[in-house]
Image (cartoon, rainbow, N blue to C red):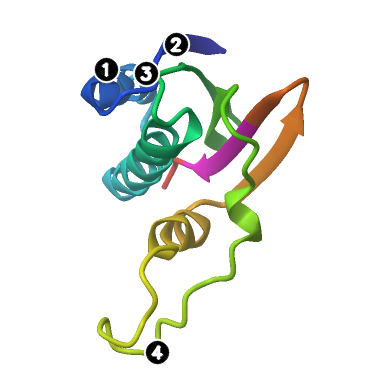
């Protein structure tokens, strides 16, 4: 399991992508799975950077594990910010037009729809959000 610890700032998003891609490059990850993982990583890291410690800056630990049979990736985000379970937020009504919909919630909805599983726990003063995605054909 590879691990990266860095400040939860939007300036570090590229470092997070580099870290995740370095792990995925060791596999035969499909382009579709890689794009879906990128979307989820972007949403989760951006939310942590924007809200977990606001207005201060705190650390986030990202772990990435690759399984071979079946081929899959497990990525966890751990922060010591404000306790928050994004999975408790009600899914947006996507049948409404953009103008009629309430602001917010679409990003985590897309994470839930694109990942095979999304789990949250609050443990030892830490938010831990874990996503899993099959990466093979």
> Disc 2 to disc 4, how far (Cα)?
38 Å
Q: In percent of the image, x 67 and y 24: which residue is there?
A: 126
Circles 2 and 4 in contact, beta carbons < 8 Å = no
For marks 2 and 4, the one nearer the N-term is: 2
77 is higher (above) or lower (below) than 46:
above
* Picture disc at residue 4: 2
Q: Secondary structure at mark 2?
A: strand
Foreground of the two, 83 or 95: 83
Q: Secondary structure at mark 4?
A: loop
Q: Secondary structure at mark 1?
A: helix
> Disc 1 to disc 2, how far (Cα)?
9 Å
Q: In percent of the image, x 73 and y 37: which residue is there?
A: 121
For marks 4 and 3, the one nearer the N-term is: 3
121 is higher (above) or lower (below) than 25:
below
Q: Position of residue 61 (x, y in %)?
A: 51, 16
The magenta span reads: 128-134
* Picture disc at residue 15: 1
Q: Position of residue 135 (x, y in %)?
A: 44, 40
Q: Position of residue 81 (x, y in %)?
A: 56, 27
Q: In percent of the image, x 45 and y 57: which residue is there?
A: 114
Q: Of the residues tagged 3 and 1, which is closer to the observer?
A: 1
Report the residue marked by disc 3: 26
> Disc 4 to disc 1, how far (Cα)?
36 Å
Q: In percent of the image, x 38 and y 31: which residue is there?
A: 49
């Amino acid at each position: 399991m590879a691990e990266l610890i860095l400040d939860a700032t939007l300036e570090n998003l590229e470092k997070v992508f580099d870290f995740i891609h370095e792990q995925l490059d060791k596999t035969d990850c499909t382009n579709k799975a890689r794009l879906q993982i990128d979307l989820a990583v972007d949403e989760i890291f951006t939310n942590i950077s924007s809200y977990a410690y606001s207005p201060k800056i705190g650390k986030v630990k990202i772990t990435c594990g690759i399984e071979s049979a079946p081929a899959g990736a497990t990525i966890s985000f751990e922060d010591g910010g404000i306790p928050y379970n994004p999975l408790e937020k009600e899914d947006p009504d996507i049948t409404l037009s953009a103008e009629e919909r309430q602001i917010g919630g679409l990003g985590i909805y897309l994470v839930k729809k694109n990942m095979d599983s999304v789990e949250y726990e609050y443990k030892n003063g830490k938010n831990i959000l874990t996503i899993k995605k099959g990466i093979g054909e």
